[in-house]
Image (spheres, grey):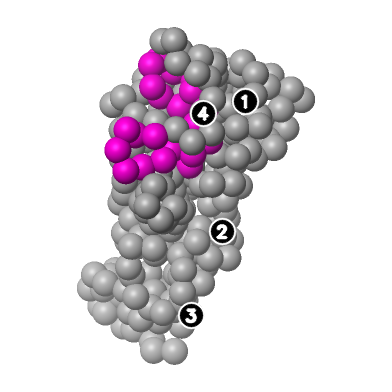
Amino acid sequence: MRILSKLGIAAAAVTLVAAGTALPADALTVTQAKAAQTRLNKLGCTAGPVDGKIGTMTKAATVRFQSANVLSQSGALNSTTYSRLMAATAKRCDVRSVPRRSGSGRRIVLSQTQNWVWLIDARGKVVRQGGIIDNPSYLRAGNYTSGGKCGRAARIRKNTDGASLYLNNFVRFAPCGIGFHQIPTYKSNGKQIHADYLLGTNYKASHGCIRVSASMSAAIWTFAAGATHVVVMR
């Protein structure tokens, strides 16, 4: 362990605790980056390989951590985020509390601030939760009900954008074309237009609908088979 002088500490704005856990000054060392990736993965944030390289996957994991821990969602492992990440009190990315004032009873709750969705049964138990991608400029916060809108079907197993994409497991809940669906897939090869690890971030923007993983889209399809209350929160 390298011991810094008081002057060095002031200049670098860093406190050396143990290898890899020192607060970063201007940039992460490889050791610090690996420590951050290891910690993000342990907290269910999905940072990917522990290689010391801060790529898109690690940045997306950092955004999920920041949103779960009520930090500015910059995607940067700055000193504040790094300190919170290494703390014993750090909150997991994949298990989150339902936002207050989201109502009660059986419902789907969507937080645009957290880029997250919860499926809640009649007893108030969270039966499923996960990351989303949406575009808040298209969908206002408020209360909705899943079902047919504007003369269009409530659920469409293989919806389409009218061009090259499928919007699988489409469940409509807001006028006129807004609903939940899997990340769009190409009709030509069935591949998603972007990876699951971008869910829970603002790195992509939908065209009004709520993109989720394939497994979450299947869960929502079943959960919202009938008219289901949907709460959209900022």
The answer to whether 120 is drawn above or below residue 219 in the figure is above
Q: Amino acid at mark 1?
A: Ala
Mark-to-mark CA distance, 3 and 1 = 49 Å
Which residue is under mark 4? 156
Counting from the top left corner in percent of width and height, residue 216 is at 57, 42
Of 176 and 109, the residue lying toward us: 176
- Residue 224's tag is 1
Q: In the visual, does 103 lie left or right of 176?
A: right
What residue sits 30% from the left and 38% below the top? 163
* Neighbourhood count class around disc 4 (C-alpha, 10 Å): few under 14, some 14–19, many 20 upward: some
Quadrant in the picture for the C terminus: top left
Residue drawn at (46%, 68%), measured in percent from left and top? Answer: 48
- Quadrant for the N terminus in the image: bottom left
| N-terminal-most mark, 3 or 1 | 3
Q: Which residue is mark 3?
A: 18
Please tell me which of labels 2 and 4 falls first in the chain.
Answer: 2
Q: Secondary structure at mark 2?
A: loop
Secondary structure of the residue carrying numbered label 3: loop
* The magenta segment: 160-182
Q: Determine which residue is flagged by label 2.
A: 44
- The quarter holding residue 106 reads top right
